Amino acid sequence: MTSQKIVLLITIFFFSFFAKAQNYKCMPCGQDCDKEVFTQAGKCPHCKMDRVLASSITFKTIETTKVCDYIKGHPKTILLDVRTKEEFEGKTDPDFGSLKNAINIPVDDLKTRLKELEKYKNAEIIVYCSHSHRSPRASHQLTQNGFKNIINLSGGMSVMTDNSCKK
């Protein structure tokens, strides 16, 4: 075999190997490890969440400083609070408040309560929690169940300074 053929075979092998390589990230948990990229499935060594294909993380994000103006400009946007019922109702300390007209489905109940949101599958949904640790996971879960327009509130209610859209 000539050296040109060997180089060609090595090049083909190299590109076919890397073309098939997949990038994984930990299931969005709202922590710094969300930014890490892994080459295989498994568990995130930091948060212990399952690793998912990076390409499956398709939701957008919005900053707390922009969310009230965004809601005013997009009044049909659905607001989904994935905190506990007690947090949503302001019965915890601290009480970070809630957004007006929000639906409350705790992240741990989301899988079993997806049918309640079925009518909003094509609607724009802003998902939030207190510190943006639960809402990225809920946002990913919604996109994996066919919801098309999911926006995660980055930082959560704990860093929200604009009270104009709070109830």
Image: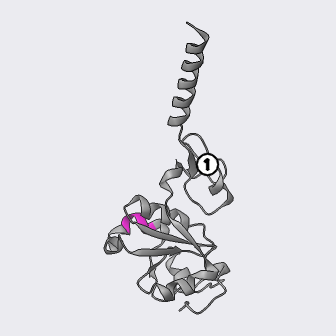
Q: Can you tell which quarter of the image residue 141 is in?
A: bottom left
Nearer to me, 103 or 16: 16
Residue at 49% x, 68% y is 107
Question: Is residue 98 in view from this perspective?
Answer: no
Q: Is residue 152 above or below residue 17?
A: below
Residue at 55% x, 30% y is 15
Residue at 40% x, 66% y is 148
Nearer to me, 125 or 100: 125
Question: Is residue 104 in view from this perspective?
Answer: yes
Q: Position of residue 117 (x, y in %)?
A: 36, 73
Relative to 2, is 46 on the left or the right?
A: right
Q: Can you tell which quarter of the image residue 29 is in?
A: bottom right
Q: Position of residue 40 (x, y in %)?
A: 56, 40
Q: Is residue 38 above or below residue 149?
A: above
Q: Amino acid at mark 1?
A: Cys
* Magenta-drawn segment: 109-113
Q: Which residue is mark 1?
A: 44
